[in-house]
Amino acid sequence: MDILLKEQFLTLWKKYFGNAELPIVFYYTDGDGGSELVPIKSGRSCIICELAAVRSGRSLVFNAERIKCGGGRRYLGYTERMRPGFEYFLSCGNDNIEGERYLRTPEQVNEFMKSQKSLHAEGRNIVFKRWDKLTESDQPEVVIFFAAPDVLSGLFTLANFDQTEPNGTFTPFGAGCGSIVYYPYMESKTERQRAVIGLFDPSARPCVPKDVLTFAVPVKRFERMISLMEESFLITGTWKTVRKRIG
C-alpha cells in the first residue's frame, strides 16, 4: 500500500466528507495481514454483521472454515456449491423449505445462478481492514464504504466524474456480501472497473443502520477517484451545502 496515497485520502476525506465513516478494504492472501483470526462460530452468522468490528477499527481475517453462511462462502469464493434445494430457498419454498421469495420461481433461480462467474479463493485468507489501519505490506483489492445517502451521493457522483457513459456504477441483484466482495472483485478484473452500490439484501439489512447502503469499488478505480477529488464538484458551493449536513 502506498502510504502517501493512504494519507492523501484521509486528508481529503476529512476535508470534503467531515466525520463520515471511513471505508474498509479487503484482499486475498496466503498470510493473515497482521490481522485477528475471526473465531469459528456455531449456528448462523452473517459476514455483514461481523464486519461491524472492522468498521470500528479491528482488522479481521476470514477463511472457508470461519464463514458459516453457505452464501457467504460462495460469494467470497470458497465454494461453488449451494445448499440442497437452494432454488426453492431463494424463491417460493416447498414442503420442506421456507422460501425467502427473493426470486419468483425455482427456475428463475437456476437461470440466475448460471450467469454467475466463478471466484476461486480456495486455500486463501481474506483480510478486512479499515483504511486508516493499512500498512505498506497490505495490498487492498476493493474499497468498501458503508454510507448514508448524502455520502453515497458524493461517492456516486465522483465515480462518474470522468465518465461519458452514464453507468459508471451499477447495482446487481444478490446477497449483501456479494455486493461488497463478489461483484466489485469481479469488476476489478475488467477494463472499466465500475463501482457497485449495494446492501439491498433484506436478510443483511438488520446488520447495518437503516440509513446505510454500501459503495464498493476496485482499488485501481478508487485511486483514480482520489486523484480527481480536488477538481470535481467537491470544491463547489453545491457540495459545501451537502458537506454541512454530513457534519
Image (spheres, rainbow, N blue to C red):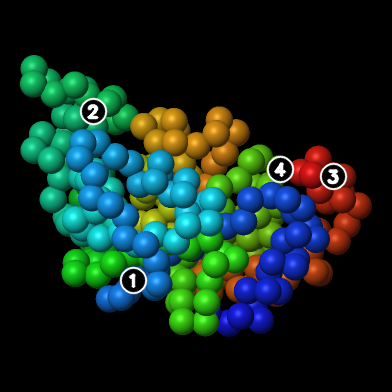
Q: Where is residue 170 in the image (x, y as percent from the top left)?
A: 50, 51
Q: Which residue is labeled 3 in the image?
A: 244
Q: Which residue is labeled 2 in the image?
A: 91
Q: Which residue is labeled 1 in the image?
A: 32
Q: Residue at x 15, y 45 (%)?
A: 82
Instruction: Name the disc covering residue 116, or none.
Output: none
Question: Of helix, strand and loop, which one carries label 2?
Answer: loop
Q: Residue at x 75, y 66 (%)?
A: 12
141 w.r.t. 159: above or below: below
Q: Nearer the viewer, residue 234 or 245?
A: 245
Q: Which residue is labeled 4 in the image?
A: 150
Direction from residue 49 to residue 222 in the image, left or right:
right
Q: Where is residue 130 in the image (x, y as percent from the top left)?
A: 53, 61
Between the C-alphas of marks 4 and 2, the distance is 34 Å
Question: Of helix, strand and loop, which one carries label 3?
Answer: helix
Earlier in the chain: of badge 4 and badge 2, it is: 2
Between the C-alphas of marks 3 and 4, the distance is 10 Å
Q: Which of 21 and 60 is in front in this view?
A: 60
Q: Residues within 10 Å of mark 3 (few under 14, many from 20)?
A: few
181 w.r.t. 243: above or below: below
Between the C-alphas of marks 3 and 2, the distance is 43 Å
Residue 197 visible? The answer is no
Earlier in the chain: of badge 3 and badge 2, it is: 2
Q: Which residue is drawn at 19% across and 21% down?
A: 98
Direction from residue 241 to residue 120 in the image, left or right:
left
Identify the amino acid type marked 1.
Answer: Asp
Earlier in the chain: of badge 1 and badge 4, it is: 1
* Extreme residue toward the right, this view: 237
